[in-house]
Amino acid sequence: MTSSEKSRNRRKYIPNKAALDFEPTMDWTKLEAKNEYLQKNFEFKVDLISYDDCIEGMKALPDESVNMVLADPPFGIEFHKMETMYNRKSENVVEGYQEVKIENYDQFTFEWIKEIPRIMKEDAGAWIFSGWTNLKDILFALEMNNLSVVNHIIWKYQFGVFTKRKFVSSHYHILFAVKNKKKYFFNKIEHYPEDVWIINRKYMPGIKKNATKLPTNVVLRCIDFGSRPGDLIFDPFMGNGTTATASKGSFRHFMGFEMNKDLKEIIEWNLNKVELGELYLPYSERFDSSVEKAKVKFNKKQKSQEKKENNEKKSELMDFI
Ligand SMILES: C[S@@+](CC[C@H](N)C(=O)[O-])C[C@H]1O[C@@H](n2cnc3c(N)ncnc32)[C@H](O)[C@@H]1O
């Protein structure tokens, strides 16, 4: 076989082969992940939340000190007035949600996003949540502060507020933006990770919370793709502390801010409920739907090949008789 024939053969597309051979870019056993977590040292106090304004607070953090940013900023849609719509029992709503006036939203967005590139390590990514109404302000601020959007993820959930004269909004945007497009960290832990995520919001009746709580699974998914065990995840708008609990549960350190001091009790309760590393499973042991689909197809193909070969053998035998 000539070398060009060989390379042509090498490049031949074999259906499902890539999925069957898939391995996560980086993986750690539970013990390795725990060791990564325990061995990390930081120049400042981590695994805590500061009950202050994040814009001022970020200014005190050292340069290039965080591995990943996860931010779910206030919506700027006067959400504090709608809290009881999302949580029907008003006694379960924690008051004091710090909202931003619509007319100030662009300035507010610019100010907090301006602080982020300096504290991000060179390979860090920022995962920013936004509804569609204020998306333009976030995109503008990212561009003006030299952060490049690598992915624009749509997170689809199962319910939104009932509407009469327009479609019900049941999706959110997650922008994955980086400092350095050539160097950013991304652990490809699935064979075919698409940019539309269907993850339901949990209805949690009877539980005290600020009504904007993100599902832990959405936050964990960002953390799994965007960081390694032992890394420091920074969240400027902690809310109920979802980023803190997801970080602790997956052997990551966390640090962040929340202006509403009334949430302290809930955040601490949520954090105490989660054991260190209890949400972590090595990536190669997780269910990957595209790999599973490929296995089914591959098995089918193998069976039909065997059947074909058996039929051929049979007809050869018949000819012989
Ligand atoms: C959309 S919520 C975050 C929800 C959070 N991701 C969770 O899962 O619970 C936004 C939070 O930012 C807080 N906040 C608003 N302005 C802030 C600021 N300048 N600094 C720190 N926190 C702020 C609000 O009080 C609110 O709790």
Image (tube, grey):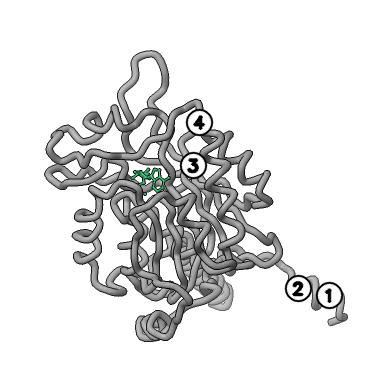
The residue to which callout 4 is attached is 104
Task: Name the secondary structure under disc 4.
Answer: helix
Circle 2 residues within 10 Å: few <14, some 14–19, many ≥20: few
As measured in the structure, the alpha-carbon distance from the residue carrying label 1 to the one carrying label 3 is 46 Å
Which label lies toward us, 4 or 3? 4
Image mark for residue 5: 1
Q: Which amino acid type is marked by label 4?
A: Asn
Which label lies toward us, 1 or 4? 4
Q: Residue at the location (27% across, 50% down)?
A: 261
The residue to which callout 2 is attached is 9
The residue to which callout 3 is attached is 173
Q: Which amino acid type is marked by label 3?
A: His
Task: Name the secondary structure under disc 1.
Answer: helix
Task: Name the secondary structure under disc 2.
Answer: helix
Q: Is residue 2 above or below residue 22?
A: below
Q: Residue at the location (27% across, 39% down)?
A: 96
Q: Residue at the location (58% across, 68% down)?
A: 64
Give 278 or 27, whichever is nearer the viewer. Answer: 278
